[in-house]
Amino acid sequence: MALDCYLKDQMGTTLYHYPIDESLHRSIFSRNFQPIAFPILARLKDYYNDHFIATNEIPILIAELQLLKPQLPEQLQHSVAELIDLVSDDRIDTIECYCD
């Protein structure tokens, strides 16, 4: 089971699909995760609820992922780097995350 994130443009077209699998999710949130330091990521902690990230929140999410990446196990850093690359696409307007 994954937390499926759909990165959409202004027209609502899905440009990318990025599944956050249980292992990555657990690694992000089981460490000494401090929600105050990662306000956008903190919303994704509840794996079973839907989450929406607005246009103005995307730069904050990118900064949070960049800060978090070196804190994760090396084998998961590539996954976070890939997500950073996708989210950094200028065409991305919103991100919708759903539990499958």
Image (cartoon, grey):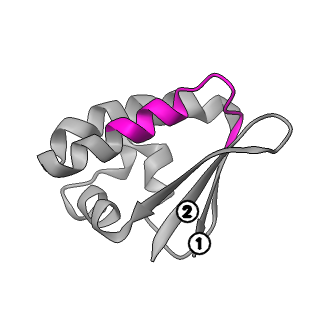
Contact, mark 1 vs mark 2 (Cβ under 8 Å): no
Highlighted magenta segment, given as a residue range: 81-94
Which quarter of the rendered picture does the N terminus lie within? Answer: bottom left
Q: Quadrant of residue 64?
A: top left
Measure how far apart labels 1 and 2 are at the Cα level.
Answer: 11 Å
- Name the secondary structure under disc 2: strand
Image location of residue 92, percent across then percent down: 66, 32
Who is closer to the viewer here, 90 or 51?
Answer: 90
Q: Residue farthest to the top?
A: 90
Q: Residue at x 79, y 44 (%)?
A: 13
Q: Quadrant of residue 97?
A: bottom right
Q: Residue at x 28, y 67 (%)?
A: 23
Give the residue pinned by disc 1. Answer: 49
Q: Estimate how packed mark 1 is, as few (under 14), some (14 to 19) or many (20 or more) residues with alpha carbons within 10 Å.
A: few
Q: Residue at x 18, y 47 (%)?
A: 72
**As shown in the figure, which amino acid type bears the numbered disc 1?**
Asn
Who is closer to the viewer here, 64 or 7?
Answer: 7
Image location of residue 46, percent across then percent down: 47, 69
Which quarter of the rendered picture does the C terminus lie within? Answer: bottom right
Residue 64 higher or lower than 26, as above or below: above
**As shown in the figure, which amino acid type bears the numbered disc 2?**
Asp
Q: In the image, is residue 70 part of the stretch drawn in magenta? A: no
Q: Residue at x 19, y 55 (%)?
A: 32
Among numbered discs 1 and 2, the one appearing first in the sequence: 2
Give the residue pinned by disc 2. Answer: 4
Q: Tell whether 55 sits left or right of 16.
A: right
